[in-house]
Amino acid sequence: MSSEEEGVGAKLGKAVQDYQSVVDDYDRETARLLGVNETDLRCLEILMATEEAAPSTLSAQLGLTTGSVTTMLDRLEKAGYLTRTPHPTDRRRTLVRVTPEASEKTYALIAPFIEDSTRQVMGRYSAEQLELVADFLTFSRNIQQEHVRRLRELPAPGPSRSGGRQAPGPRRTGAAGTR
């Protein structure tokens, strides 16, 4: 790799890290204003994008145990952010949906950002440049997802912590951590 490529790679790496940091900050502030934690916010984002999901799907996407998902859903339902209804064809399953009020409240917080960033980005870059950026982000996301899966396969070094975005990973049982 040439020194020019190394320089561009370092600049890109720093830009991605900085971008991720500000995305995390934005998510934290949005969660604060909604009165939820960041994992709850991520659950709401998933549900708003898919309209409905089974708790098992949320468990897999969030990297949480089914018990943690149940606790989270109880909390969000109590706050009026979601509903749980029986599956229309399989009475053993449940479907989770965001309430219209939660959707409205969330969009009221994020709409100014979406509108402003769309206007500014579209005004600065050509369609061809934006296609390249979209390809880069999609490609990078796929690589990161592969590594999320890899990390979820590794055991935690100690007892599980509670709260936050914690992947279930391999379970440790017993004093020696055997299964």
Image (spheres, grey):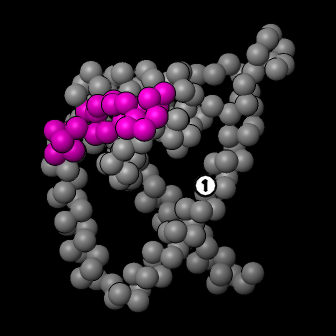
Q: As drawn, is 144 to the left or to the right of 39?
A: right
Residue 103 part of the magenta segment = yes
Q: Nearer the viewer, residue 137 or 76?
A: 76
Q: Where in the figure is residue 20, as x and y percent of width and height?
A: 46, 55
Q: Nearer the viewer, residue 13 or 23?
A: 23
Quadrant for the N terminus, please.
Answer: bottom right
The part of the image, by quadrant, that contains residue 123 is bottom left
Q: Relative to 114, does residue 48 appear above or below in the rendering?
A: above
Identify residue type, mark 1. Gln
Residue 100 visible in rendering: yes
The part of the image, by quadrant, that contains residue 27 is top left
Q: Relative to 3, does residue 144 appear above or below in the rendering?
A: above
Circle 1 is placed at which residue position?
Answer: 145
Q: As drawn, is 61 to the left or to the right of 77?
A: right
Q: Relative to 6, does residue 58 appear above or below in the rendering?
A: above
Q: As drawn, is 4 to the left or to the right of 119?
A: right
Label 1: how many residues lie within 10 Å, few (<14), some (14-19) or many (20+)? few
Q: Nearer the viewer, residue 4 or 125?
A: 125
Q: What range is drawn magenta here?
A: 81-104
Q: Residue at x 50, y 63 (%)?
A: 16
Q: Where in the figure is residue 178, as x and y percent of width and height?
A: 84, 19
